Amino acid sequence: MAVSETGRKPRPTPMAGTGYRRALMLVIDAGSTLLENGGEVFRVQQTMQIMADSLGITDFNVYVLANGIFVSSHGRTEIRHVPATAIHLGRVEAVNELSRELAAGRLDLAGAEARLAEIRAVPSRRAAALAAASAAGSACFAYLFGGFLAEAVVALAAGAAESLLVQLCRKKRISRIFSDILSAAAGTTVALFCRAVLLPELDADTAIIGALMVLTPGVSLTMGVRDIINADYLSGAIRLLDAILVAGCLACGVGLAYTAAFALREVL
Amino acid sequence: MEYLFQFVVAAVSTLCFGITFQVPRRHLLACGIGGGIAWLCYVLCLALGLSPAMATFAAALPLTLACRLFAIRFRAPVTLFLLCGIFPLVPGAGIYYTAYYFLQGAGQQMADKGFETAKIAIALALGIALVSSLPLPRHRRARPAGPRNAGENP
């Protein structure tokens, strides 16, 4: 075991056998947990390196991409495909804390394994809570973009509908592109329906924009920029491409709903 | 007073986004404040007559700085605050109007809006990049073990 009982800074010692294998797996699992929950490439790489150093894994080489991890050490090579799932920043923070405690010598291998299992089991907030949050966020944005009470209320409804749809699509493993188009179309439809049926003087533009903010690719944009700053150009480019794609999907969704509404008006 | 209210609303909306990104409860307030700062700067810059792209750039600077300070203060990854705080500046309206004019067949207006949206996104990216690469004193983060944990290892 690399961690001594007394010292805060144990000297890394090369290990062999199952301990070495377990340590390597722990580092890789921690890395994929970070990556799939919204950590930047450089943070994943750095955290894995720090953990490997403090666990005494020598000859540790790691290369991280936006959706994959490649590790090799003493002739053993591990590759993980880490597809993007839902963002959970709480887990990112927890793994960060784990690596810090490991580096400070306050955790041993078994303790770190237990902690990582705990982190991976941290539950997400309930669907209703997420929908409520995105609804409230949408309403606030509708106000910020110049709306009044009516616009905020409509954005509230549209934002909740979008959030529920996105979560449903995620559960059914429907592709992101389709779910973005669908959600944007649903949000727009809610607002246009409210204007057509309930509130003729509603400023539908403001309400739709407020609701659309939930779906905008702010995450991909920010992460892409951060990756590029850290010279991870490939991952950054992947994420910026994702941002452009999502923006296009939102535009498609809005367009779809408007086209349907125009067609419906012609018919009626 | 009006600006104070705008700040609060922007902070609440950012906080809501923080909830959807599963930010731990103890960091939600900081997230909200970041978003509030960003929006307040944006609105003030618009009132001063800056273009939306310039205003976004100008707002991204204090936002990123605040997020980095929060990260040092709370010993948490900067992403936690930045991902949420950025949302008031993301050009959602631009995406919407681009699609809208496209459907209207208004080519010129669509091109204008699309170009402006891209400009805002680039300004935002530049703003984040500029402050992120700024060196900050790191001694607080580099301290190996905080005094709050001093008693753990006898």
Image (cartoon, helix red, strand yellow):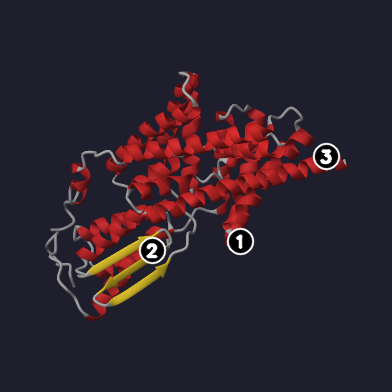
Position of the C terminus of chain B, as image quadrant, is: bottom left
Residue carrying label 3: A265
Within 10 Å of the Cα at label 1, are there few (<14), some (14-19), or many (20+) other Cα atoms?
few
In three-dimensional space, the C-alpha distance between marks 2 and 1, rounded to whole angstroms, equals: 22 Å
N-term mark: 1 or 3: 1
> What amino acid type should be assigned to the residue bearing mark 2?
Ser
Position of residue B45 relative to residue B94, above or below, is above
Q: Is residue B104 at least partly visible in the picture?
A: yes
In three-dimensional space, the C-alpha distance between marks 1 and 3, rounded to whole angstroms, equals: 31 Å
> What amino acid type should be assigned to the residue bearing mark 3?
Arg
Q: Are marks 2 and 1 on the same chain?
A: yes
> What amino acid type should be assigned to the residue bearing mark 1?
Ile
Q: Residue at 57% across / 29% down in the picture?
A: A145
Q: Is residue B88 at least partly visible in the picture?
A: no
Residue carrying label 1: A174
Residue carrying label 2: A32
Dot 1 falls on a residue whose secondary structure is loop
User: Which residue is outermost to the right?
Assistant: A268
Position of residue A145 relative to residue A69, above or below, is above
Q: Position of residue A228 (x, y in %)?
A: 37, 49
Q: Are marks 2 and 3 on the same chain?
A: yes
N-term mark: 2 or 3: 2
Q: Position of residue A97 (x, y in %)?
A: 29, 54
Within 10 Å of the Cα at label 2, are there few (<14), some (14-19), or many (20+) other Cα atoms?
many
Within 10 Å of the Cα at label 3, are there few (<14), some (14-19), or many (20+) other Cα atoms?
few
